[in-house]
Structures are given as C-alpha cells and as structure tokens.
Amino acid sequence: MEKILITGSTGFIGNNLIPELSKKYRIVGISKNKIKSSKNFISRNIDITKSNFTLQNHFTKIIHMAAYSDVTYCNLNPTKCYELNTKSTQKMLEIARKKDSSFIFLSSSHVYGNPNKLPLSETDIDYPLTHYASSKKMSEILCETYSQTYGLDVRIARIFSVYGPKSPKSNIIYNIINQMINNSTITLGNISPKRDFIFINDVIEGLIKIIDSKKKGFQIYNLGSGKSISVENIVKTCFKIHGKTLQVISSKEKIRKNEIPDIRANISKMKSEFNWKPQISLKTGLGITYNHVFNK
C-alpha cells in the first residue's frame, strides 16, 4: 500500500477526502489542528510555515491542500495569505523534488479572474483579481516551474464553488442556509453573480481520479459542474427546501470589490481522461447541506 502525505488534512476537503483515500493508501496528514488517527491514517500537528519544517519519510505522492481559502481574510491579511498559500507550496515542492514524489496541488477557479468567454478551459488565460487568487496562481507557476525544471510529475485541480455538509462558515451556501434557519432575514452582498457550484462528494470523486492518475508531466484539471447559477436562484431554491420565504437584505458592506458576474467550468478534460462527471444535482446537494445545518 502506497504511503502519501496530505497537508491541510483537517480542512473541509481534507475531512471528506481522507476517509475515501485511506481505503487504498496509507496517509500521513499534517495540519495545525490535530485530529484523531484511524485505520491507514496518522494525524500530525505541524505548522508547515515554520522555517524548520522537514520530513524524513518517503511518500509516493504529496497532496498539498493547506491554505487560507477565505477571500476576505486574505485581503485583510495578505502577508499571512502568501506565507501559507504560496511560500508553503514552494517548501512542499522542494520536498517532493528531493523525495521524488508526485505532487498534487489544490488550486481554485479564482485564478481565472473575470473571464471574457465561458465555459472556462484549463488553457484559457487567467487574471487573478484578489490576494487569494494571486496566491493560488503564484503556486501554480511554481508547480509548473518545478515540473519543467526537474521533471516532477505535477497535477493541479482547479476547484470551483464547492459546498456541502461541514463546509466553513465563510462558504456562501452554508451562510445562506445558516441564516435561513437561525434568523428572520438574510443579509448578503450582491446576489446577481453566477457561480459554478459543485457538491463535495463529486469533488472528492474527481480528486481521487486525479490522485490515482499515472499521467506524467504537468497537468491542470477543472473540477466544477459545468453550469452556473446566480446566488439569487440559490436563495430561492433554499427557500423551497426551507418551506418559507424570508426577506433578503443586500448589504453594501458585504459586496466584494472586483465581483465576477459569471463563471463556469469546461469539464471536458475530466470527462475524456477519467470518465468523470458530477453525479449530485444542485437541488439534491442543497437538500443534504440544509439537513446537515438544520440538525447540527
């Protein structure tokens, strides 16, 4: 059984990925927050931003997920954002180079910025507009440079708007449902932008195919649904699940600068190479997420 390393193992995606990956790999997960170890999974409490961070063991694959993913937090704390999101990527790539490990990096649809055409293919020009997006794009450049310079096998997953049970409070869908259940009104920013929402289970299935892949060289894959829907329509669908309609208040304080009006993924590469496509409909995914938040 291969031994792999996962950074950011206690995050939203890590918590969902590890139970599935541990069926076929032995995993060492590192994070600032230690969690309980289980079969084929060892959790270690390590801060990878520390300068003395080293690894003695050999891993066939390194999956780098550790990052600040809250766009607002990154804009308010750019130094911390780049320290974890970009500098740690270079550290992990250097470890992968020395250990001759393949490298899987979790990036984001945010790197595309405001697209001039849709849907977005992996080869389309990107133009990051926030510190979070820039930190991910810089990491992607590092990944490609290490692959081209040292022959490192690198696979990047550009994840679109993932949601589902146990998502962080900053997640837009969690935020909507949580307010719906606990408040008499819902306060949001701009509700007209469209996003490509994808349920966590579909992301995990796609990631496993990317991780298992024997593809050589440098590869990028979009992980999205291939469809976009406005935040306003997400709210309306959630109202139907909730059984009643609430007042929606648009707050200027919550409106982001450089808001992207529409974004959606071209997922033909994932379909053609891995025979992968999302299985969970938006309505089903929202229902599962609503029930989880309601029963917390």
Image: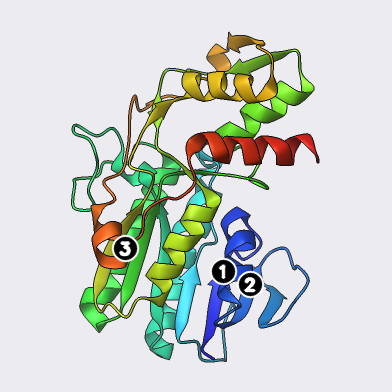
Please give the residue where the numbered disc 2 appears in the rendered image.
Answer: 30
Residue, far right = 296
Q: Label 3 vs label 1: CA separation?
A: 27 Å
Q: Report crowding for label 1: few under 14, some 14 to 19, many 20 or more residues within 10 A (C-alpha).
A: many
Q: Residue at x 26, y 41 (%)?
A: 127
User: Foreground: 68 or 50?
Assistant: 68
Classify 6 as above or below 125: below
- The kind of residue tagged 2 is Ile
Q: Secondary structure at mark 2?
A: strand
Label placed on residue 7: 1
**Earlier-in-chain disc, 3 versus 1:** 1
Which mark is nearer the camera, 2 or 3?
3
Q: Residue at x 45, y 87 (%)?
A: 60
Q: Residue at x 68, y 48 (%)?
A: 166
Q: Secondary structure at mark 1?
A: strand
Q: Is residue 180 visible?
A: yes
User: Foreground: 9 or 78?
Assistant: 9
**Earlier-in-chain disc, 2 versus 3:** 2
- The kind of residue tagged 1 is Thr
In the image, is 69 to the left or to the right of 165?
A: left
Label placed on residue 275: 3
Q: Quadrant of residue 237?
A: top right
User: Foreground: 230 or 46?
Assistant: 230
Q: Residue at x 56, y 32 (%)?
A: 172
